[in-house]
Amino acid sequence: MRITGWSRATPAEAEALAALFQRAEAVAPVGMEQRAEDVQNRLVTLGPDSAGRTRVGRDDTGSVAAYGEVADMGTADDVLRIRLTNVFHPDIADDVRAELHHWLIDQAKQLRDSRGSARAVLGTRSAENDRAGRELLIRGGFALARHERDLALAVPDEPSAPALPPGLVLTPVDERYDELARLAHNEAYADSPTAVRPDQRTWPQHATGHPRFLPDLSCLVLAEADRSDNPVAAFLFALADGSTDTPTVVLHCLGTRAAWRRSGLATAMISRVLHRARSAGVRQLRLKVTDSNHPALALYRKLGFVESGQGFAVLMRQLTPEADEQP
């Protein structure tokens, strides 16, 4: 399959992009959005600058057959983090893959230069079975960084009751704590070099403003005797999952600030979701966790989560002036 023309992605193409993502996910899953409203949300979250670093390829019938995206993921430890995304129709020609790869790298260099950053790191996903795509990335200087595990848990008939240490309380997500929840989220993920750490503009689309956000199945843990200026000790934001026929909830964003880790907060929040999910007709929970996060992976497996087969690999590459000669 060939591409006859490229253009910038627009919200009007959300339906066509969702159809492409669905087809690609069926053969090489990397966790892309598969509903038009989610694709629109993705494009909005990119912001005005990164939205210009998108590329949609159409075949000779006018159908969308390829998509590329370069996204600014913020700076950590003086290193600019850049996410590269490419999605193809399963029948796309290999040279189209190579062409889009080179475009992504060039756009990433331009983004780095526009931010005045001497150092940047690129991250991209690769399906576990996408051998050709993986080889292209490795030839371009990328190396395997980790595997993202997609785990699933059948909702039990009688889930355990949530329990918290004294001084902590489970509460529904409340707009009064919205900014504090964002700060808690970014602090909890501060030690993860590839995590999304939203600013005030992008936070709503990441959490409570997400089109599939489920307020009744989301929660916060508050510290009654606050140890800092922020009482939000932990958070769980749940989304409806429309990609399966089984009624499923995605634990989209689940984290605990460092001071309260290993105190049973994640277990309590998941137990609360299980209690409410059963009465809401939900039959399954899903979440993603990196294989390098050994404590979280061990906890989820202890709670009964199992591999769904929808995981993927993450590859990374340094992008410095010295590395600019790499393809």
Image (cartoon, rainbow, N blue to C red):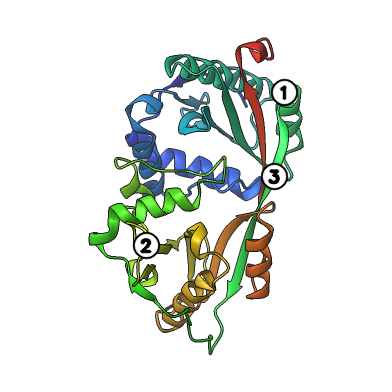
Q: Would you say 52 lies left or right of 306 here?
A: left
The residue carrying pointer 3 sits among few (fewer than 14), some (14 to 19) or many (20 or more) residues within 10 Å by Cα, namely some
Q: Would you say 94 lies left or right of 217 here?
A: right
Judging from the image, what secondary structure is the residue with disc 1 in? loop
The residue carrying pointer 1 sits among few (fewer than 14), some (14 to 19) or many (20 or more) residues within 10 Å by Cα, namely some
Q: CA distance from mark 3 to mark 2?
A: 29 Å
Residue 179 vs 99, above or below: the answer is below
The N terminus sits in image quarter: top right
The C terminus sits in image quarter: top right
Frontmost residue, 289 versus 53: 289
Residue picked out by circle 1: 141
| Residue type at numbered disc 1 | Gly
Frontmost residue, 216 versus 69: 216
Residue picked out by circle 3: 146
Query: Which residue sits at x=75%, y=27%?
Result: 138
Whether pointer 3 and pointer 2 mark residues with C-beta atoms closer than 8 Å, the reply is no
Residue 57 vs 177, above or below: the answer is above
| Residue type at numbered disc 3 | Arg
Location of residue 98 in the rendering, given as x and y in whole percent from the top left corner:
66, 21
Front of the two marks 3 and 2: 2
Front of the two marks 2 and 1: 2
Instruction: Indicate the quadrant where residue 181 lies.
Output: bottom left
* Residue 178 appears in the picture as rendered: yes
Q: Would you say 269 lies left or right of 41 here?
A: right
Location of residue 233 in the rendering, given as x and y in whole percent from the top left corner:
42, 63
Judging from the image, what secondary structure is the residue with disc 2 in? strand
Residue picked out by circle 2: 232
